Image: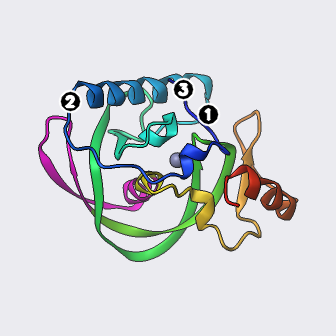
Amino acid sequence: MKIITTPDKRLREKSEKVRVIDDEILKIIADMRKLSLDWEKEHPYELSAAMAAPQMGVNKRIIIIRDDMENKQNASFTALINPEIIKAEGKIRKDYEGCLSVPSLYGMVPRETKVRIKAKLEDGTEVRIKATDELARTLLHEIDHLDGILFIDHIKDVADAFYRMNDKGDLEPVKDYEKEIKNNSKLWGKE
Ligand SMILES: [Zn+2]
C-alpha cells in the first residue's frame, strides 16, 4: 500500500459505499493510519491531518481525521465510514489547503465554515458531527476525495492562489501560475 498522487486516475473516481464493516474494511483503515504517519515522518514541516481511502487507490467511502490537528505527538485518527454532508453553510472563507496526493502544492481554497456530517464509526455506531472552521474544511476536503474531487478544482481565482513549499518549510507563491495550471491540468487528471 502506498499513497498515490496525481495524475493517477483512481483519485478521480467516485468511490463506492461500504456495505458491511468487515475485516477487509478494518484492514483498510489500519493501512490508512499507518500510511498517514509514514508520510508525516518523511515531511518534517507538515502534519498529516486526514486521508481518504482513494488516496491509497481504494475507491471506498472511508476517511480518517486526526483527533488533534495541533499536536503531532497525538497520532490518533478517527475513521468515518460513508460520511455524508447533511448541510454545509456559513460564510465562505479562503484558506490554505494541501493534499498528500498533490505533492508540495498548496492553494487558497474557498469553503463553507460550518458543516453537519453523518457517518459510521468503525464499530458501526452512527454519528452526527457538527464542525466549524478547520475541521469543517478538512471534512469537506476529504469527502470531496470520495467523489473524485481535489482541492485544486475549487480554485477559480488562480492569481496568487497557488503556493509551493520550499525545503525550509515556507510557502512561496507559484509565480508562473498560468504555466503551472496548464501543465497540471493534465497532471491533475482533468482532461
Ligand atoms: Zn487530499
Using the image as rendered, state which of residue 106 and residue 6 is in the foreground.
6
> Mark 1 is on which residue type?
Tyr
Label 3 beta carbon less than 8 Å to ligand 1:
no
Q: Nearer the viewer, mark 1 or mark 2?
A: 2
> Mark 3 is on which residue type?
Lys
> Mark 2 is on which residue type?
Asp
CA distance separating discs 1 and 2: 35 Å
Q: How is the image coloured?
A: rainbow
Looking at the rendering, the stretch of residues picked out in magenta corresponds to 117-141
Q: Which mark is residue 22?
A: 2
Compared to residue 151, the image places residue 88 above or below, namely: below
Q: Position of residue 58 (x, y in %)?
A: 44, 37
Say which residue appears at 82% left-offset and 56% top-offset.
180
Q: Earlier in the sequence, mark 1 or mark 2?
A: 2
Which quarter of the figure has residue 27?
Answer: top left
Question: Does the residue at mark 3 contact the one at mark 2 (Cβ under 8 Å)?
Answer: no
Q: Which mark is residue 2?
A: 3
Which quarter of the figure has residue 190?
Answer: bottom right
* Numbered marks: total: 3
Query: In this view, which residue lies farthest toward the left?
Result: 125
Query: Helix, strand, or loop for circle 2?
Result: loop
Examine the structure image and report whether residue 123 is included in the region drawn in magenta: yes
